Amino acid sequence: MREITLPAYPILTFDPMMSLWSASDKLYESDVRMWTKHDKPIRGYIIIDGNVYRFMGAGNEEIIPQTKVEMGLTSTKYTFEGIVRLEVTFTNPFILSDLKLTSRPVGYVTVNVVNTDDKKHFVDVLFDFSEQLIYRGKKKLTVGGISQLAGGNVGFIGRRNQKPMYDAGDILDTDWGYFFVAGQLKVALCSSRAVQKYLSGRPIKTGKGFCKELIADKSATIDKKGTFSFHFCFAWDDGYSIDYYGVKKKGYWTKYYQDVYAAIREGLKDYDKTMARCLAEDTGAENEIIPNFGLSYYTLLLASFRQVIAAHKLIEADGKPIFISKENSSNGCAATVDVTYPSSPLFLLQNPALLRGMLDPVYAFARKPVWRYDFAPHDAGIFPYVMGQVYAIYGQYRRRSYADKKKLPVFMYDRDDIYNYKRQMPVEESANMIILTAAYYNETGDKKYIMDNFDLLQKWANYLVEKGFDLENQLSTDDFSGWLPKNVNLAIKSTVAIALWAKVLQKLDLGDGKEYRVKAEEMAADLKRASDRGDHYAITLDGDGWSTKYNLVWDKIFSLNLFGEEFYQKELTYYKTKLNTYGLPLDHRNSYSKSDWMMWVTVLDDSDETLRLYADTLVKMLAETTMRIPYPDLFETIEKAMVKGNPMFARTVQGGMWLPLYAIKVAQSDKNYLL
């Protein structure tokens, strides 16, 4: 684990509806909150010989001073020093190669108390989980219970009136489901007043009606230089997670466990083994990345790993894992194609089945009668409703809750007037789907997947051939920057997608890909000629400004040889003249940057110079930004203030931090199916 500085630290991260962060330098300086910025108090106290010290959450008690915070890929560890040394570690065991473990809604809190003097001490460590964890907004009626489990105790708390998935939107945390704590320790339900009385020396009073706080408590006497260690599980059961084209789906973990109690039971049993696996993942990553790429780059991976995964929900449909992203902080869409695009490198590296699970909902919608376009959809719903594209839909057709009975789920409409064509992203999403599907095939050799979707891929490739060069005034994934006609970076994406489709056809013997290859070569030559401005290539075919050409990376990764080293080097050299204190601006129109695209263009440099330089600036941004939010991907590069308008944070796009590693994997692998 490494000591790093972030604007927010992951604490309990499950999915878009339960992802808790500490937005303070010290764990006791503020309450834990959801990625949405809504407070979700968890208070932590250590009582030493009757004296109360707070180590977590806001309050008026004396604190035990925090000395450091360390991060691993799956854990966040806080250390406090006083009469004793207190270490508290929060772990979500995301091992992506193991979907049973990754989807299991069970995490761990590990506590270690070390006596640092020559005296014996009585120590009591108490965690107080507020009922606010499980409802949104104003106070709701809650219920809870305590029972025995696996030689210990388990307690839960949840809303009395459960309405899973009753609404959809962006800045929403859960308003349904149950939160659990379990382990070989005291678990209790009590009022907040009872907690304060306990801290003053009275017993915890529990009973009916005290469903406001869920308590985990353990105590021991430690001798001089002695230690006191324990752990417990926290768990989250949302009941139903996703409405997948009219079918209510539970989390993928229910494929393996009868209920959440069975999942918790196994989580407790497997604690040592699971923590050892997490440690092995951390150690392996450190030993590989830091010597070769530096601590700054490794810091970016630590900052993003749990955030990326927790921006998804894993379910099962038709016997396959379906991985539904939520477009956090930017519109709440589900299975957004141009969010999957930047996030894909992490999953291509660690489990390509998850990328397939991100593409499947889009392919499914593209076959519905309501989708009558020759290009790919933008998304497959609004989280947690996977019911068809909501982006660019006219308001009278958009269903926001189950209570809205006047509107059909999008996929059930059979008409062609429900979308505003001008708000679509036709070239962006069609190219994304071709590129991502080709990359998935390259990792897996899954020819059946290509065959199952051949008709759509061919149609989208033909659309790009016709429409993908001299682009009309249309949106791209960087829509926050505004519309842009004759967009060179977007035309580059279209060009490499056509070339990749040519390669797919040739490798799988599905037809003559030569005409597509010739077209891609013609487009690349025309793009270079029309956009060349001497020391850089322009943002538009007829403009003089500049932009970050991050879509070039596939030309490099898949050896398409369309644009060439001279193009790459000219762009990289020019970018260095535009690099600001906190990063590389997206283009000449604004001073804000996108961290995912910054990391992508480092792949164009065969050395690690650009990677290290850009990683250093991003780490500086994370350490100095005034934005106390999970790793933002849209930020100012000159000032430390938040981007004016809509900030983007807690998003899965930070999976793009892994693209340099994915590029190396492709270059070194002898199991590429496309190359």
Image: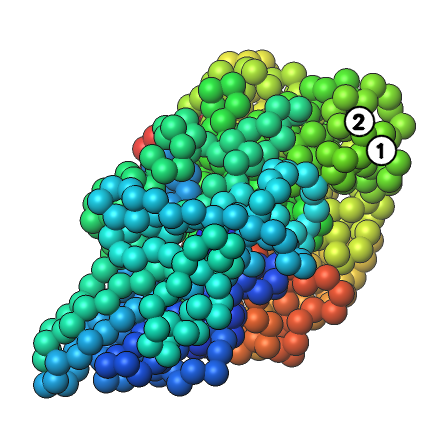
**Residue behind mark 2:** 408
Q: Is residue 589 left or right of residue 62?
A: right
Marks 1 & 2, CB-CB < 8 Å contact: yes
Task: Work out whether mark 1 precedes mark 2 in sequence or the reverse, and give the earlier one.
Answer: 1
Secondary structure category for the residue under label 1: helix
146 versus 515 height, above or below: below
Question: Where in the figure is residue 6, as x and y percent of width and height?
Answer: 47, 70
Q: Is residue 244 visible?
A: yes
- Other-residue count near label 2 (Cα within 10 Å), few / some / many at <14 / 14–19 / ≥20: few
Amino acid of disc 2: Leu
Q: Is residue 646 left or right of residue 577?
A: right
Q: Residue at x 27, y 56 (%)?
A: 185
Between the C-alphas of marks 1 and 2, the distance is 7 Å
Closer to us: 39 or 170: 39
Secondary structure category for the residue under label 2: loop
Q: Residue at x 22, y 45 (%)?
A: 151
**Residue behind mark 1:** 397
Q: Is residue 288 visible?
A: no
Closer to us: 237 or 272: 237
Closer to us: 525 or 608: 608
Question: Where in the figure is residue 272, as x and y percent of width and height?
Answer: 20, 49
74 versus 391 height, above or below: below
Name the quarter where the C terminus is drawn: top left
Q: Residue at x 29, y 42 (%)?
A: 149
Q: Is residue 411 left or right of residue 502?
A: right
Question: Where in the figure is residue 153, as x and y percent of width and height?
Answer: 30, 49
- Other-residue count near label 1 (Cα within 10 Å), few / some / many at <14 / 14–19 / ≥20: some
